Amino acid sequence: MSGNKEIPTRPIWLGPARRTVQIIDQRALPHELVIVDLATVDDVIAAIKDMMVRGAPLIGVTGAFGAYLAALNAEGMSGFEHVFKSECERIKSARPTAVNLAWGVDRVCSAVFSAKAHGGRSAVALAEAEAVTEEEVDNCRRIGEHGAALIEEISKKKNGRTVNILTHCNAGWLACIEYGTATAPIYTAFERGVDLHVWVDETRPLNQGARLTAWELGQQGVPHTVIVDNAGGHLMQHGMVDIVIVGTDRSTYTGDVANKIGTYLKALAAKDNNVPFYVALPSSTFDWGMEDGIGQIPIEEREPDEVRYVDGFCDGRICRVRVVPENSNAANYAFDVTPARLVTGFITERGVCRADREDVLRLFPEKRR
Ligand code: MRU
């Protein structure tokens, strides 16, 4: 990484006098560390849309802090309720797939509207945004503990030989504040001394695996190898993957999993080769009102230029090159849905369960209707 700034340990934090929110601009990683100040709802929406911040839990927390900024900027206005509510709705529409965004914003919105006194509404919003953040950190820590047990079990079966884990995209601390979701079990097992190695899917078009997951794992000293997105099936056929662990942007409580485009193909290959396929998620990423993931989860389509061009580090700076013929069209579907039948299990903050309604509701009985 160029520059001499110390690397922050979280991807989001409060700015001076708590009047702004600061983020790592993840578009520049791992080559440059760029910190950006968000002062307004428009700043927050742009940061989410342009993927300076990304990953479902982080989008949720950014949404929560966005709602805080909305309250701060509307405080004292005569039409506070109306302005605050419509600003929250605007934040919620920044990206469609990750359900955490609406969850984070709604948490802050409800806290503000249920506060007894009308004074200090931004203080209420800030307290709730901070609570959301710390809960997500704790959830990821617990996911790490539950998921590490699965890795330790495989290590035991292999008599301590290297456990090979495949992951897709970035579901690490950059996406989730601390620990990550898919990476939390990896970090925990590694700290406990399990001999492991991670296959990191590069994750075109924006290369979150090659840029972010590889960088995170490298910082922690976790052995890893970056592979092209289509290598997973070959590795699984040759016994070179013991377990797949991915994150998710929205999962139905019935077990369907929306995650970064290409996840479905990994799940198919895992099924065909009897490789366990786990999805790690906090409860904020479950959609408790949706049953049919393939039919109902909105799949974001992004700018085709993200496919047509690739960013990289060249001659000491980040530059962009075109990788398709000048006049070729491109399509950019950002997520796909893996049906529940291909998912071995969910790793949640409350434990591991099957990817089906009964077992998910066993862990989260308060969600039964
Ligand atoms: O488009 P992104 O980068 O916001 O997508 C999010 C992801 O990195 C993943 O799909 C991830 O596996 C789930 S978020 C922990």
Image (tube, rainbow, N blue to C red):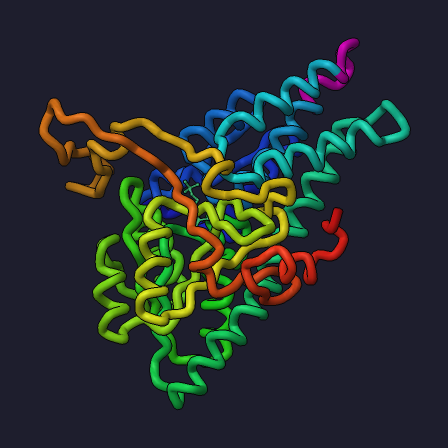
Query: Residue 160, percent across and down?
Result: 39, 87
Residue 69 position (above or below residue 365) = above
Outermost residue, right side: 116
Query: Residue 293, percent across and down?
Result: 50, 43
The question of residue 75 being in magenta is answered with: yes
Quick check: 142 left or right of 47? right
Q: Which residue is drawn at 72% across and 30% down?
A: 109
Outermost residue, bottom side: 159
Magenta part of the chain: 72-81
Query: Residue 255, percent across and down?
Result: 54, 53
The answer to whether residue 138 is visible is no
Q: Nearer the viewer, residue 368 or 156?
A: 368
Q: Nearer the viewer, residue 193 or 56?
A: 56
Q: Residue at x 42, y 46 (%)?
A: 337
Query: Residue 79, percent across and down?
Result: 76, 10
The question of residue 79 being in magenta is answered with: yes
Residue 231 is drawn in which quadrant?
bottom left
Residue 30 position (above or below residue 14) = below
